Image (cartoon, helix red, strand yellow):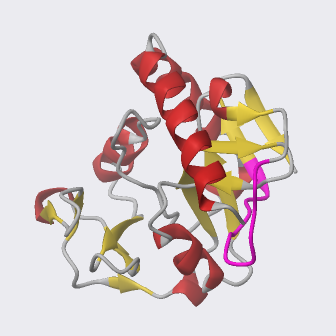
Amino acid sequence: MDENTKDTLRKYYREIRQKAVDKEKLSKIICGHIKILNFYTNALRPILYWACKSEVSLLEICEERWEKKEKFGLPRCLDKNGNMDVFEAKKYEMSFDCNKVLSPNPKNIILPRDIDCVFVPAIAFDNFGRRLGQGGGYYDRFLRKCGDAIKIGVCFSMQISQDPLPEDEKDERVSIIISEKGIIKV
């Protein structure tokens, strides 16, 4: 796969996402869709993410789970080589990872085999479940280890490409995409 094509698409979708208005309002709508999704409501310990770079914010769901004392995990980037694990998220035990993203402290690891659903951010998705990530390969490497876990993409609707996104053998797909416009099963 031509990395220049991916980089061009990343630039295009980053600009679109950056220009989106009412991201906070749209994030609330998306969180509402997540809260009624069976894969989420039935999950013992869903894996969420901490938004950065104008991504859809799942903070409302994190706060709600902390308030109800319900367990969940968040990713933590371990190094600059694309290695990531997920750990149980405890509100007052968060710190910055190697990419300066607020993350759970690396002590209560959640093993990939114990994950039933993982919510995945991206710069763009297409209707086939292909995702265009930031380019570091963190999620691709991690998702590959998650076996039967349901992989759920989260984005604003303007990040869903009507054309197939480029894909190579190391790219991991999602099976559901959630935006403010609803839920797409791919």
> Residue 41 at x, y = what percent?
63, 53
Q: Please tell me whether residue 120 is drawn above or below residue 20 in the rendered image.
A: below
> Residue 10 at x, y = what percent?
54, 43
Identify the image quadrant of the N terminus: bottom right
Q: Is residue 137 left or right of residue 39?
A: left
Residue 154, located in which quarter of the rendered image?
top right
Q: Is residue 101 left or right of residue 144?
A: left
> Residue 9 at x, y = what percent?
61, 41
Q: Main secondary structure of the magenta part?
A: loop
* Residue 132 in view of the camera: yes
Query: In percent of the image, x 55 and y 55: which residue is there?
Result: 133
Residue 131, located in which quarter of the rendered image?
bottom right
Residue 173 shown in magenta = yes
Residue 77 shown in magenta = no
> Residue 30 at x, y = what percent?
58, 30
Residue range highlighted in magenta: 165-176
* Residue 123 in view of the camera: no
Q: Front-most of 25 and 131? A: 131
Query: In percent of the image, x 56 and y 31: which residue is there?
Result: 12
Q: Please tell me whether residue 129 is drawn above or below residue 170 in the rendered image.
A: above
Q: How many numbered dots are placed on residues in this image?
A: 0
Q: Is residue 55 left or right of residue 79?
A: right
Q: Please tell me whether residue 174 is drawn above or below residue 16 in the rendered image.
A: below
Query: In percent of the image, x 65 and y 24: which residue is there?
Result: 158
Residue 71, located in which quarter of the rendered image?
bottom left
